[in-house]
Image (spheres, rainbow, N blue to C red):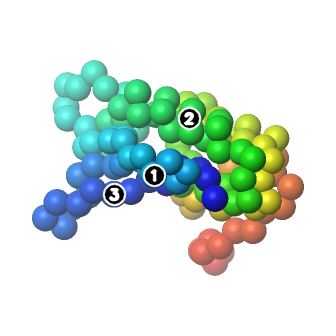
Amino acid sequence: MAGVVTLGVWSDGEKTALQALDLRSGERRGLARLAVLGSHAATIGRWAFDPVALQWGADALRAACPTDLLIVDELGPLELSNAGGWVSALTALQFGAYGAAVVTVRPGLVQRFSDVAAVRHTVVLGQPAP
């Protein structure tokens, strides 16, 4: 198993930060913190992302294959709308040597993911009923 997952960091019942975990090495990096007004960090929604950690995660995803199981948690607006962040996961999904993959995508971006990922077979779990 290889890939990257995003873990929430909680304080007093509120998610205050995000960490990225490389499943192959077990290494963790601080990925994002709640954005502060006036900050010059790259922000998506309420999160200010660390560009060094984003690059580290992208590199981990590029090196994840070959693997039996590829995990990518998560692809969001940064990747699917801005071609940034962990967009390298899309290349790994299209061309990488893996047996199966599990990818988390925000519900509002599932169609966009399907349009750009070009993976062999897709099963959507937990999608709200129309």
Which residue extends farthest top? 40
User: Is residue 125 shown above or below 57?
Assistant: below
Which residue extends farthest front? 25
Residue at mark 3: 8
Which residue extends farthest left? 12
Say whether residue 59 is left or right of residue 14.
right
Earlier in the chain: of badge 3 and badge 2, it is 3
Query: In 3D space, how far apart are the residues under numbered discs 2 and 1 (Cα atoms)?
Result: 15 Å
Residue at mark 1: 26
Earlier in the chain: of badge 3 and badge 1, it is 3
Q: Are marks 3 and 2 in contact (CB under 8 Å)?
A: no
Q: Callout 2: 10 Å neighbours few (<14), some, many (20+)? A: many
Q: At x 60% / y 75%, what residue is drawn?
A: 126
Relative image position of residue 128 (x, y in whole percent): 59, 74
Say whether residue 74 is left or right of residue 46.
right
Say whether residue 37 is left or right of residue 89.
left
Query: In 3D space, how far apart are the residues under numbered discs 3 and 2 (Cα atoms)?
Result: 19 Å
Relative image position of residue 69 (x, y in whole percent): 69, 60
**Does any portion of residue 89 appear in the rendered image?**
yes
